Image: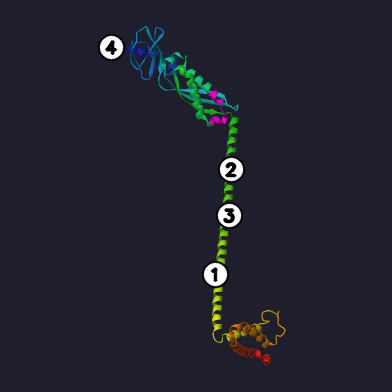
Amino acid sequence: MLRTVCRTGSALLKHSRRSAPPQWAALAQQRWASSLPMNTVVLFVPQQEAWVVERMGRFHRILEPGLNFLIPILDRIRYVQSLKEIVIDVPEQSAVSLDNVTLQIDGVLYLRILDPFKSSYGVEDPEYAVTQLAQTTMRSELGKLTLDKVFRERESLNANIVHSINQASDEWGIRCLRYEIKDIHVPPRVKESMQMQVEAERKKRATVLESEGTREAAINVAEGRKQAQILASEAQKAEQINKAAGEANAVLAKAEAKAKAIKLLSDALTEQNGDAAASLSVAEQYVSAFSNLAKESNTILLPSNTGDISSMVSQAMAIYSSLAQPKKGRGATATTDTAASILRAEIEQKHPSEGSSLSPPGGQ
């Protein structure tokens, strides 16, 4: 018996749907659910749908998905609400931004019915109400932003629209999940101005980058010159230090050599006949210097008695003898005479014409 009743109810439901006018079907699509079913005592509610039942014209209950029973004549299915997420295309509309630019903008609204009772009795047409609320809210939010911020802050704009819609749609049992702006159309002149602005911004960036490159190149060149000067000064400093160290070592070496020579000379003078050797050396140096006169330069400074060589030698030997006399005593006189004789012989060999005028040092 129950199976027969179910089959009969299903057949009547299908017949009612088939016999419904096309206008009703379009209206049903607009209300996001199927057409209103007839009360066949036994009803099967599809998943994610809520059927609002009125008893004698007053709200009675909401049928849950699955098997349900109703009383004929008294109970009537008044509304069918879909609990799925609903997508509504918000029509294109004009809005004025904060800087007085007229924009053509459209969007897509995603919502869901949370309370079928409120969505059925709280508003006459939920779709139309939410659409109008989205449009007015979008115009209001766009009026708070400039044109540049509209493109940069699209996410925040969507969030503000969703928040404003939810504040008003809570009384309707509808929850707005998200709102997305599809297209934003600007006037042609504004679009040209935007293109010029973009080109100017790109040229500005190119100029800035070029100037930064020039600055970096100049800094690198100056830094290289600075490093080169520092390295050159350090090299010059090291060179001067090395040169000074070399000169100091040379002076020390010369001083040591001279000290050794003086020591050896002093040791030689303390030996026997040392004074005679010293006298001979002084005489040789005098003769050599006198013989080189007027060879390297034509300017000569001569003493008044240049012809009296024996007197000059005797004078030099007398100076040496007076310096060596305190230490040598009488033994130095013989040594000096011997050295003078040797010197006189050398002078006679070099200057034969003047040899006859020389006399021994002691003869004066």
Front of the two marks 4 and 2: 2
Residue 317 x/y as whole percent:
64, 85
Q: Determine the CA span between mark 4 and mark 2.
A: 85 Å
Front of the two marks 3 and 1: 1
Magenta stretch: helix, strand or loop mostly: helix
Front of the two marks 2 and 1: 1
Magenta segment range? 138-151
For the residue labelled by badge 1, is the local secondary structure a helix, a strand or a loop? Answer: helix
- Vertical placement of residue 285 versus 27, above or below: below
Question: In the image, 5: left or right of 248?
Answer: left
Disc 4 or 2, which lies upstream in sequence? 4
- Residue at the spot of label 2: 208
Q: Amino acid at mark 2?
A: Val
Q: Amino acid at mark 3?
A: Lys
For the residue labelled by badge 4, is the local secondary structure a helix, a strand or a loop? Answer: helix
Question: In the image, 329: left or right of 166?
Answer: right
Residue 55 x/y as whole percent:
38, 8
Front of the two marks 2 and 3: 3
- Label 3 crowding class (10 Å Cα cut-off): few <14, some 14-19, many 20+? few
